[in-house]
């Protein structure tokens, strides 16, 4: 009979990171992600710019994506981080498969996933996402690799039952898919360039506009305007330099694993 109690684990062991980096175009998502050690990029889109990162052939289908992950899991290599740039480019591959497998209706052939009634097409996509995240986790476990996923953002009207309704930035994926991504990740960081409001014009007519600085912040706690989180108790936000930005995040995570010094308490004076 198997004795599970003999295999009880104690303590905290650092493991490779599962990181999601979101943000608007030009905020530096790819630069930050490709600063991770021994990086290999799965380029779903042409966003590498001049980073010079080592990259796989661009996948042309969902089968290509899974095929690359399987090969990385089985073959010998020295890569320490996989960067998926960007995950919202995988969603059309999934929808293409669903449409190709859909049976024609009385109204004619299925042309888009939205043509499949009662949102059934989007429900079918769940199985693809489960398969993808399992493949990423398998690669992480087999090769001890960090997995960094980049996503663009979309402005979403969010109905909060405690605060009311407001707009916020979410990963640019179907609303059913976002919970899969947020549950999977250890860190979700929203990368933003610091901006200030300024007024321009004359006394007769002025306009308010935003001016961007060179300072970038990685928000890793949920503050309302965007999805963000971390499982390490890091308060953030983290200031991210243009170069070696990954080091900032890595050092914060490493510090979270260090044992905390016991708090000193003053002894009560004798009466």
Image: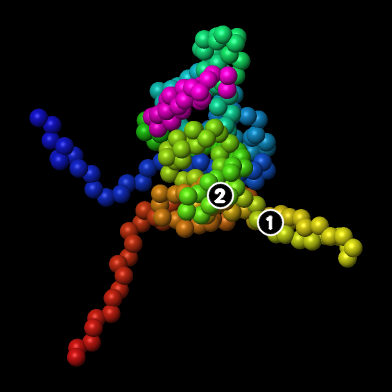
182 is within the stretch colored magenta: no
Q: Is residue 182 left or right of residue 9?
A: right
The image shows residue 213, relative to residue 74, as above or below, that is: below
* Residue furthest to the bottom: 271
Tell me which label, 2 or 1, sits earlier in the chain: 2
Quadrant that contains the C terminus: bottom left
Q: Mark 2 highlights which residue?
A: 165
Which residue is at 37% across, 42% downward?
Answer: 15
Q: Name the spot of residue 188 as percent of width and height, x first.
A: 49, 45
Disc 1 element: strand
- Mark 2 or 1: in front is 2
Which residue is at 19% across, 88% downward?
Answer: 270
115 is within the stretch colored magenta: yes
Quarter where residue 154 is shown: top right
Inter-mark Cα distance, 2 to 1: 24 Å
Is residue 262 at all visible to an observer of this figure? yes
Q: Which residues are magenta?
A: 114-138
Which residue is at 51% across, 54% downward?
Answer: 163
Q: Name the spot of residue 216 as percent of width and height, x first.
A: 62, 53
Which residue is at 55% across, 45% downward?
Answer: 158
Name the one closer to the observer, 257 or 5: 5
Q: Mark 1 highlights which residue?
A: 195
Question: How many discs mark residues in the rendered view?
Answer: 2
* Residue furthest to the left: 1
Q: Name the spot of residue 173 as percent of width and height, x first.
A: 55, 34
* Residue furthest to the front: 106
Q: Name the spot of residue 159 as percent of width and height, x first.
A: 53, 46
């Amino acid at each position: 009979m198997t004795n599970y109690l003999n295999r009880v684990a104690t303590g905290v062991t650092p493991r490779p990171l599962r990181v999601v980096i979101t943000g608007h175009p030009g905020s530096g998502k790819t630069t930050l992600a490709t600063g991770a050690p021994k990086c290999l990029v799965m380029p779903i889109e042409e966003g590498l710019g001049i980073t010079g990162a080592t990259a796989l052939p661009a996948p042309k289908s969902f089968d290509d994506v899974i095929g690359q992950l399987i090969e990385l899991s089985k073959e010998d290599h020295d890569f320490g981080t996989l960067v998926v740039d960007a995950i919202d480019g995988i969603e059309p591959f999934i929808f293409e498969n669903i449409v190709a497998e859909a049976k024609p209706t009385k109204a004619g052939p299925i042309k888009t996933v939205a043509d499949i009634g009662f949102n059934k097409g989007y429900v079918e996509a769940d199985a693809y996402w489960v398969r993808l995240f399992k493949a990423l986790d398998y690669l992480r476990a087999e090769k001890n690799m960090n997995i960094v996923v980049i996503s663009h953002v979309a402005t979403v009207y969010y109905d909060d039952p405690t605060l009311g309704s407001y707009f916020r930035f979410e990963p640019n994926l179907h609303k059913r898919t976002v919970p899969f991504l947020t549950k999977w990740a250890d860190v979700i960081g929203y990368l933003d360039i610091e901006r200030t409001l300024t007024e321009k014009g004359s006394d007769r007519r002025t306009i308010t506009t935003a001016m961007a600085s060179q300072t970038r912040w990685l928000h890793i706690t949920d503050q309302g305007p965007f999805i963000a989180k971390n499982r390490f108790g890091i308060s953030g936000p983290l200031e991210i330099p243009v170069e070696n930005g990954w080091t900032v995040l890595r050092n914060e995570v490493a510090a979270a694993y260090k044992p905390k010094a016991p708090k000193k308490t003053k002894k009560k004076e004798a009466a």
